[in-house]
Amino acid sequence: MAWSGGAARGRDGVALCASSRTAARAEIAPVPSTRERSRTPRAIPHGAGAQLALYLTPQLLAPTLLRLRGGDSSGRLGLTLAIALAPLTLAVAWLHGRYPSYGALVAEGRTRDFDLLARRATAEAVAVFAAGAAALTGIVMLLPRVLPAFAVRVLPLPSLIALFGGALASLLLQAMAGWLRAFRDEEIATPIVAGAVATVVVSGVAAVVGGVAIMPVAYAAASLLVAVPLATAHFVRVRRTRLAQSNS
């Protein structure tokens, strides 16, 4: 009985010590600041919002034209848009292949090396896009001789080039967002979404005024002259701050 009572007291003492150590660790554990708690759960929605805006902006062109101008114009725009977005897909895949290196360099504190890599990767992605766009332009120019029945379903060459311009704007926006994402910064989502909304509105107005002949040009103009400058203003400011911090 005495032995069992001593063993029980020993177990109680061990449990008490363990609970005391647990409580001590809880007391000294760092508590996230209010700003950190507020920003962490918003990072994913912000990033998803930017990607969704970049995806939906060109995809809304054909349905908008269908609603305003009918199926023939919408079908021609949809086919031409699919051609214009093909090199964008390849270029974005090329760019995404560099993202693991982005994160590794930032984690090591090599911000300058990361910036050089990001600029080189963006230039390479633009080159991939340009090569794909040039190849597809040549194919479209040959369609009237090879497949005349199919060629009439594609918009004229100026409209295709305009859609290429809108796709290039999307590539530049994704490159800027990827640079900032290496620092877990998704605040560029706000200007990207604002630019996407402006692009859709301008494209819709152009469809009402001039139909399929003007809509691709309006889409490219709004993408390159509104959406890209809005995001660039934010990107340049944050990039300058990050590079200055790396020098201090």
Image (cartoon, rainbow, N blue to C red):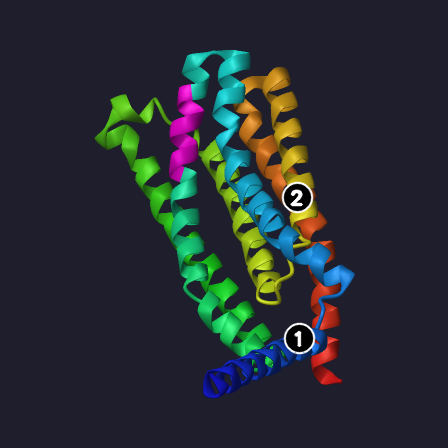
Q: Residue 188 location, x and y as percent?
A: 67, 53
Image: magenta residue range: 75-83
Q: How crowded is mark 2: few (under 14 residues within 10 Å), some or many (20 or more)?
A: many
Which quadrant holds residue 57? top right
Q: Name the residue under label 2.
A: 227
Where does label 1 land, which residue? 23
Residue ID at (42%, 13%): 71
| Cα gap from disc 1 to disc 2, whole angstroms | 52 Å
Q: Residue at x 69, y 81 (%)?
A: 246
Main SS category, magenta section: helix
40 or 113, nearer to the observer: 40
Residue 244 seen in the figure: yes
Write the residue at 39% across / 35% down.
Answer: 82
Of residues 133 and 197, the one nearer the viewer is 197
Residue 117 on the magenta span: no
> Height in image: 88 above or below 108?
above
Q: Please tell me which residue lies in front, 162 or 6.
A: 6
Residue 188: assigned label: none
Q: In this view, does 101 lie above or below 194?
A: below
